[in-house]
Amino acid sequence: STGLTHALGVDLAPSDVWNYGTSLEAGTLEDPRTGAETERRALGASMGFNDGDLRLSSAVEYRIDNTETLTDPETVLENERKTWLLKNTLGYQISPDWRLVGKLNYSDSQSSQGQFYDGKFTEGVMGYAYRPVNNDRWNTLLKYTYFYNVPTTDQVLVTTSSTSSANEFVQKSHIFSVDTNYDLTRRWTVGAKYAYRLGQLSMERENPEFFDSAASLYVLRADWHFVNKWDLLIEGRLLDLPDAGDRRSGALVALYRQMGRNFKAGL
């Protein structure tokens, strides 16, 4: 879509610790194929806190979209969609070696066409990182993710053969992962990763009946800094899908050249 939108925002930082913001948006978008217009109005607010060890930020937006749908050249249907959007992030430095990170994103979308066209989305992440300062040979990250999705019709590409079933599903996932690496010597680093996902899917929205789909990922890797500015990576992977009775394995070999202290490129 193309069009013109107007945005106005104000940010205020009354101190080094707190900051606030507001925003307004108004405009009209037009579908270049059909000429149907979408009139958008949005209002947002944000807040942040940072005292060095603790970082918090939160934002909320309320949006109204009035969308035209052309069923034929002479018939125009109008749909009003109201959407709440929330975004939250967290960072806490427990000690110089331990850090806690997290985020929570949420969306609730309601359509004037009825409950079937509504949508919801939730993504929550909590991570725990161990990065020692005095002896950084060992680094570890633990992370948990919760995912919930009820897509709207605008999010799903449907075909003429299945105009309704494609956007009826409800999806949930629980994902846990641990990633660690250790410097054996100045030239050799070994690492491992394990991730587990419990996916749940229902093809019915009103009375959902979920069926599970589990997956496990195993990764082993080794990095060899064999000569100045050159690194070699060897990695083995295994993806186990027990519910599908399937296993997939693979290997990766890569050669990198360091370009400065913070960047390297390779094949």
Image (tube, helix red, strand yellow):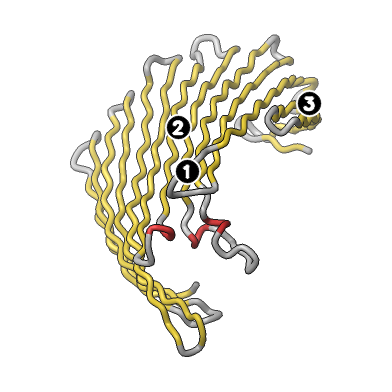
Verify CB contact (< 8 Å) between mark 3 and mark 2.
no
Distance between the Cα atoms at labels 3 and 1? 49 Å
Residue at image position (55%, 80%) is 33
Q: Nearer the viewer, residue 142 or 215?
A: 215
Position of 215 with respect to 112 (left or right) is right
Q: Residues within 10 Å of mark 3 (few under 14, many from 20)?
A: some
From the top left corner, tell me how far across and down residue 222 is, in percent: 74, 19
For disc 3, the marked residue is: 232
Is disc 1 surrounded by few (<14), some (14 to 19) or many (20+) residues within 10 Å?
few
Point out the image quarter for the C terminus. Answer: top right
Ranked by sequence position, the earlier of labels 1 and 2 is: 2
Q: Which residue is mark 1?
A: 208
Distance in Å between CA atoms under marks 1 and 2 = 24 Å
- Eye-nearest disc, 3 or 1: 1
User: Which mark, by number, is residue 103?
Assistant: none
Amino acid under label 1? Pro
Which of the two marks, 1 or 2, is nearer to us in this view? 1
Q: Residue 162: image x %, image y %?
A: 61, 63
State if disc 1 and disc 3 touch (CB < 8 Å).
no
Residue hosting label 2: 125
* Front-lying residue, 15 or 150: 150
Looking at marks 3 and 2 on the same chain, the residue that comes earlier in the sequence is marked by 2
